[in-house]
């Protein structure tokens, strides 16, 4: 194991991680730069941190060469030191693993090294070393994105493994003793921040956040800042300037015992990083002592914090949000200490080390991951229906090595990464990405759009040539178009997932013709419903066509029935064809006055703001002001659905699938939907929901009135609906997709 320095002589996350891993792998030999007074005999210590770089590199190289003579696998942690041994002939034989602990070249820039040449050289060296490895280990999905996007490493052998934490050292211990030793009031509200004092750690923003809320915090609240670094004097000055000296204490570097006291004494830890954070080991250390952390949304921090409580994550550098979250914590809005410890217990070092051992064993035995490699394409990263469907199913694929390429940065990229799915962004020109489907005219699209599409096809083809997937799966209409062109050029099989109606009631005729022609080139066609499939009928080629529904999990929340007047809700993006206007007109007709309430959840996503304004005006002109609530886009839809009694789906052209219908059922609601398209196939009328005559406000109003009057019918429909979504479980749907890949690959092999 080729390391950097030896912890604690060198203080850094990389060195701490390296030492812990080595100690849990007694069969491993190590090489580090000294000093390393307490290193075991299995570690060769060469040169010293303060010796000249050429000397360090040369002695490291020689030691690495000697140590690796008897090694069966080489695992490196730092590109600069590992470069010579890895790239020279001496180590060509053994399989190589690289632990990517952070973008070294960029970190140097962030730390103030302004030399462009040094940056370019460092980056080039890192790329060479990284690309030469047979397998990579990163601590978070966020860092997987970095090595795939910035270093162009292929994603297939990247392992995302959170670090371990020393659960026997970091324990909840004696909290009041810890407070007494630190001179803290037993009742005080205590926040800690344990970090190296360098700019990227964002400690200054924490001090500023504290200044905002200091007056509102309980008396004797304290912020402890632990750590050393070049910013120490500046930060101390800031504290004095803001008049915070009474409540903010800078402890500098502390001993291991004091560090434990700090974690144990604290109510909450703050990790306000603004750039580059592979994981944030401090989050686990604090949790192991029973202290939850409020973190910024940077790098791997959300992955470390959200499993405990999603609300612990705030935007980086946003002093207001950070202050607010700390203030809420002072009022008790935090996971319990027991929950924090239980969470940390998932990260035992022996288990982490065993995972490494297993990887080494497989590499030595020459075992390969034989699962088909599937690249998923989508042109957007917004949380729209097709994208949510993808997000739900991908984490459940077991027999596939999946990687997603998105055309824009956005919440889908973050959510996929957080769900452990490999993702990268290959940006599409915004004008092409946001080109409205209505603007595809007779005689073809505009020359600019054609040119941009072809340019993107070339870029994508270049990327796919490097990735060498077995299958490309296109998830949106635009991705279907550019995906099929790139893949036909490269001879990669394509599964085209159609989630929209390919018919003139949804897209212009020229686009219908274009898509139907292109779909014919796909090797497999998946439609989200029979009615969608019928719109592309006759299009599929040899390997066939499948109808695979979208998926849903049961709502995690119970209904919040308040026993009051019935609440009718609509959920979905705001767009003319989604029929928010039909819903409001039917509601007004059904309940001209009365207690019933209407709720509209959702927002325009693809430029339908004019329609949204019309819907608001309509509500006013129907006299519904005060009885209709517009909630805007909500990510946590289950909370919204818990407050509904009836979910109304009102699309005025046949809905291709309508995940919203499944979601309403999974939340145990009575669902009212039109008698056509996807919803009509999902709902058994009168048993698991109610169908009304599509586009008919009168029919919808009558059904709404009935359900308002008959609470027991609502209950009965909701209960059977919840039971009926079982076949739509994400793992079941993922299994069906895997069968499609089997067929397509089988057919490709026969060709
Ligand atoms: N959705 C959401 N928040 C909102 C409105 C909608 O998360 O405020 C989600 C909704 O829960 C569903 C998706 O957007 O998962 C819409 O999918 P659907 O298949 O119903 O329609 P599409 O948008 O694909 O036409």
Image (tube, grey):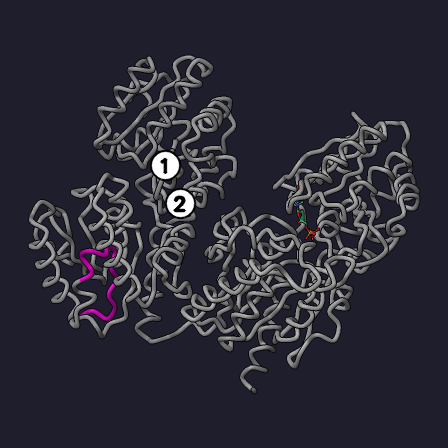
Residue under circle 2?
299
Residue under circle 1?
273
Give the residues in magenta. Answer: 70-83
Q: Residue 695 carries which label?
A: none
Q: List x then y, in percent, for residue 24.
A: 27, 55
Q: In which quarter of the image is residue 494?
A: bottom right
Q: In which quarter of the image is the C terminus?
A: bottom right
Is the residue marked by circle 1 packed among few (<14), some (14-19), or many (20+) residues within 10 Å?
Answer: many
Please state if 266 lies on the left or on the right of 44 as rendered.
right
Q: Is residue 680 above or below residue 699?
A: below
Label 1: which secondary element: loop
Label 2: which secondary element: loop
In this orientation, which residue lies closer to the viewer: 438 or 320? 438
Q: List x then y, in percent, for residue 300.
A: 40, 46
Q: Looking at the image, do the residues carrying marks 2 and 1 touch, with CB atoms under 8 Å apart?
A: yes
In this orientation, which residue lies closer to the viewer: 614 or 57? 614
Please state if 411 lies on the left or on the right of 149 as rendered.
right
Residue at x 12%, y 62% (from the top left corner): 61
Residue at x 23%, y 54% (from the top left corner): 122
């Amino acid at each position: 194991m080729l390391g950097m320095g030896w912890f604690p002589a060198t203080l850094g996350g990389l060195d701490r991680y390296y030492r812990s891993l080595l100690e849990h792998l007694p069969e491993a030999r190590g090489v580090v730069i000294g000093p390393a007074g307490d290193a075991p005999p299995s570690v060769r210590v060469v040169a010293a941190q303060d010796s000249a770089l050429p000397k360090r590199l040369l002695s490291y190289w020689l030691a690495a060469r000697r140590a690796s003579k008897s090694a069966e696998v080489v695992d490196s942690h730092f590109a600069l030191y590992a470069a010579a041994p890895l790239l020279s002939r001496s180590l060509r034989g053994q399989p190589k693993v690289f632990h990517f602990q952070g973008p070294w070249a960029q970190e140097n820039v962030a730390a103030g090294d302004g030399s462009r040449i040094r940056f370019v050289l460092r980056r080039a060296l890192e790329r060479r070393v990284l690309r030469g490895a047979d397998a990579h280990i990163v601590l978070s999905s966020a860092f997987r994105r970095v090595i795939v996007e910035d270093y162009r490493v292929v994603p297939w052998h990247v392992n995302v493994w959170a670090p371990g934490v020393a659960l026997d050292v970091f324990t909840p211990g004696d909290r009041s003793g810890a407070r007494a030793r630190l001179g803290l009031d037993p009742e005080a509200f205590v926040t800690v921040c344990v970090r190296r004092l360098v700019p990227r750690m964002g400690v200054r923003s924490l001090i500023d956040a504290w200044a905002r809320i200091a007056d509102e915090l309980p008396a004797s609240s304290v912020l402890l800042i632990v750590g050393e670094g070049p910013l120490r004097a500046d930060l101390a000055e800031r504290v004095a300037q803001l008049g915070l000296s009474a409540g903010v204490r800078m402890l500098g570097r502390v001993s291991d015992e004091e560090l434990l006291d700090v974690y144990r004494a604290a109510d909450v830890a703050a990790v306000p990083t603004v750039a580059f954070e592979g994981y944030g080991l401090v989050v686990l250390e604090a949790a192991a002592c029973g202290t939850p952390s409020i973190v910024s949304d940077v790098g791997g921090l959300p992955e470390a914090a959200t499993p405990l409580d999603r609300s612990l994550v705030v935007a980086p550098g946003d002093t207001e949000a950070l202050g607010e979250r700390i203030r809420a914590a002072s009022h008790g809005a935090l996971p319990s200490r027991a929950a924090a410890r239980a969470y940390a217990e998932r990260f035992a070092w022996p288990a982490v080390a065993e995972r490494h051992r297993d990887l080494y064993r497989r590499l030595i035995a020459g075992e390969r991951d034989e699962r088909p490699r599937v690249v998923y394409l989508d042109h957007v990263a917004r949380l729209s229906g097709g994208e949510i469907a993808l997000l739900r199913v991908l984490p459940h694929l077991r027999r596939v090595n999946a990687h997603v390429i998105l055309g824009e940065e956005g919440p889908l990229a973050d959510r996929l990464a957080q769900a452990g799915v490999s993702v990268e962004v290959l940006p599409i020109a915004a004008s092409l990405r946001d080109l409205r489907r209505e603007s595809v005219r007779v005689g073809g699209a505009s020359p600019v759009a054609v040119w941009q599409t072809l340019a993107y096809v070339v870029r994508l083809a270049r990327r796919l040539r490097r990735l060498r997937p077995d299958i490309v799966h296109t998830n949106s209409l635009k991705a279907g178009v550019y995906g099929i062109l790139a893949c036909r050029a490269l001879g990669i099989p394509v599964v085209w997932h159609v989630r929209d109606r390919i018919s003139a009631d949804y897209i212009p005729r020229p686009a219908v013709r274009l898509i139907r022609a292109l779909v014919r080139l796909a090797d497999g066609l998946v439609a989200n419903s029979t009615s969608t499939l019928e719109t592309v009928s006759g299009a599929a080629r040899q390997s066939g066509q499948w109808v695979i529904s979208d998926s849903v999990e049961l709502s995690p929340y119970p209904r919040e029935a308040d026993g009051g007047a019935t609440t009718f809700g609509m959920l979905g993006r705001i767009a003319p064809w989604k029929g928010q206007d039909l819903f409001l007109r039917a509601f007004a007709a059904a309940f001209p006055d009365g207690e019933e309430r209407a709720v509209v959840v959702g927002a325009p996503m693809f430029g339908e703001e004019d329609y949204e304004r019309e819907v608001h005006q309509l509500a006013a002109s129907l006299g519904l002001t005060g009885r209709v609530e517009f909630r805007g886009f909500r990510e946590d839809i289950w909370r919204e659905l818990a407050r509904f009694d009836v979910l109304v789906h009102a699309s005025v052209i046949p809905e291709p699938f309508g995940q919203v219908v499944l979601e309403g059922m999974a939340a145990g609601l009575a669902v009212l939907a039109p008698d056509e398209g996807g919803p009509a196939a999902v709902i058994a009328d009168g048993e698991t929901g109610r169908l009304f005559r599509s586009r008919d406000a009168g029919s919808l109003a009558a059904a709404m009135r009935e359900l308002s009057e008959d609470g027991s019918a609502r209950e009965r429909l909701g209960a059977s609906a919840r039971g009926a979504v079982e076949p739509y479980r994400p793992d079941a749907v993922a299994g069906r997709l895997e069968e499609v890949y089997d067929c397509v690959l089988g057919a490709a092999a026969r060709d």
